[in-house]
């Protein structure tokens, strides 16, 4: 093995070299990395030290998230002690959490988006394993998120055990005032799947009817009012599946979480989502997003994808559910008329 240069010299070589190498190691291009360093320094109180520049601090942090690198691997690559690596990681994490407040929020409530749950790897103590091993078969952290149609996270709630049902997280998020969930204004709604209760402001598909895009790709065109609506609903709601897919593919740490405290694991998830949004907004060209923009029906695979369609029990007596059912029928009729060749 070639002897390692010091971390800063190595980083400088990367910044002068091939763009692809920077993207492979830090999951963003050189210009976006420099913008991030400047923002963290100018707006989020990240400071350089006598022995380490902002670039090296941020580079070490991104190296951990992008590759799932251990403390030992970072020591070898950047030539710093384990204590320095750990202290730097938590320092950058703190600044990134401040950045997250500005990055993960809704900027346009007229263009709402979709809500869903997803899972990432979790490292938990043996006494907690049962609560965290759900249908995935491995310990996971269950996360609820909302995203816009341009694949940016607008809300995230982390830290729930893998056995928690998505509907439970949803009810907690929309009813807990201190979470500041961006509720839809009158006349607007989020798209949700069949695992969520139909209620005012949250539009679910018809149950017991073909829904997922691959079902229509295999079985042909939608037939009838309900299938036409579900096909439309699925094609729009897949924005969150695409968002989850590109986010998880970018940050390897989400697939194999190192043995950090669970509080740190939660923070890592939030920060990785904020970085996802940052890249979406700041990068002039990003290979992962470019592929999705060019292929609107492509959904990156999710290694923790839940293949079970658990459907929520919904009370048709609730006024909110009745209102959304009527809206769904109205949309379905309009789509049926617009697609009268089916």
Image (cartoon, rainbow, N blue to C red):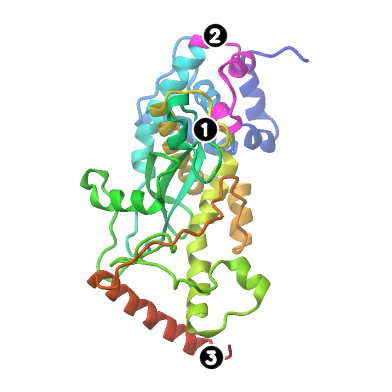
Around disc 3, counting alpha carbons within 10 Å, would you say few (fewer than 14), some (14 to 19), or many (20 or more)? few
What percent of the width, then of the height, locates residue 57?
A: 50, 21
Of residues 205 and 44, the one nearer the viewer is 205
Query: Looking at the image, do the residues carrying marks 3 and 1 touch, with CB atoms under 8 Å apart?
Result: no
Give the residue at mark 1.
Answer: 34
Residue at left 24%, top 47%? Answer: 176
Q: Residue 201, percent across and down? A: 30, 66
Q: Quadrant of residue 199?
A: bottom left
Q: Earlier in the sequence, mark 3 or mark 2?
A: 2
- Residue annotated with mark 3: 340
User: According to the image, label 2 marks what residue?
Assistant: 81
Q: Secondary structure at mark 1?
A: helix
Task: Locate residue 28: give its quadrant.
Answer: top right
Q: Quadrant of residue 141?
A: top left
In magenta, the rendered stretch is: 62-83
Q: Is residue 190 left or right of residue 68?
A: left
Which one is nearer the viewer's eye here, 54 or 100?
100
Q: Specify whether residue 271 is in view.
A: no
Crowd around label 1: few <14 · some 14–19 · many ≥20 (10 Å): some
Residue 106 is situated, as x and y percent measured from the top left of the image, at 34, 53
Q: Position of residue 166 (x, y in %)?
A: 40, 51
Determine if the magenta segment contains residue 109.
no
Q: CA distance from mark 1 to mark 2?
A: 25 Å
**Is 176 drawn above or below residue 203 in the view shown?**
above
Query: Spatial distance from mark 3 to mark 2, Cα to Cα?
Result: 68 Å
Label 1 or label 2, whichever lies nearer to me, is: 2
Q: Is residue 334 left or right of residue 238?
A: left
Instruction: Give the structural element (helix, strand or loop) at label 2.
Output: loop
| Magenta stretch, main secondary structure class | helix
């Amino acid at each position: 093995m070639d002897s390692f240069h010091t971390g800063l010299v190595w980083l400088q070589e990367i910044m002068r070299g091939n763009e692809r190498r920077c993207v492979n190691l830090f999951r963003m291009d050189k210009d976006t990395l420099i913008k991030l360093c400047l923002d963290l320094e100018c707006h989020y109180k990240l400071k350089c030290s006598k022995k380490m520049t902002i670039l090296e601090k941020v580079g070490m942090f991104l190296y951990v998230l992008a590759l799932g690198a251990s403390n030992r691997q970072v020591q070898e690559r950047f030539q710093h002690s384990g204590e320095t690596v750990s202290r730097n990681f938590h320092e950058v994490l703190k600044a990134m959490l401040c950045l997250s407040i500005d990055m993960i929020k809704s900027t346009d409530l007229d263009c709402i988006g979709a809500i869903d749950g997803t899972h990432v790897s979790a490292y938990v103590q043996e006494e907690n394993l049962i609560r965290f091993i759900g249908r995935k078969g491995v310990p996971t952290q269950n996360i609820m998120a909302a995203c816009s149609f341009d694949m940016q996270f607008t809300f995230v709630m982390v830290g729930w055990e893998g056995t928690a049902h998505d509907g439970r997280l949803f009810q907690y998020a929309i009813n807990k005032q201190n979470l500041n969930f961006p509720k839809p204004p009158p006349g607007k709604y989020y798209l949700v799947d069949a695992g969520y209760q139909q209620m005012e402001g949250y539009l679910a598909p018809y149950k017991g009817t073909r829904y997922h895009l691959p079902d229509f790709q295999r079985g042909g065109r939608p037939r009838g009012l309900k299938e036409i609506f579900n096909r439309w609903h699925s094609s729009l709601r897949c924005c969150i599946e695409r968002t989850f897919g590109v986010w998880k593919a970018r940050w390897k740490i989400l697939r194999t979480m190192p043995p950090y405290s669970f509080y740190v694991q939660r923070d890592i998830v939030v920060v990785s989502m904020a970085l996802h949004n940052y890249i979406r907004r700041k990068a002039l060209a990003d290979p992962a997003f470019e592929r999705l923009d060019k292929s609107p029906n492509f959904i990156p695979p999710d290694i923790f994808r839940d293949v079970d369609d658990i459907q929520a029990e919904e009370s048709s007596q609730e006024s909110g559910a009745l209102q959304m059912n009527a809206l769904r029928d109205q949309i379905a009729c309009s789509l049926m008329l617009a697609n009268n060749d089916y």
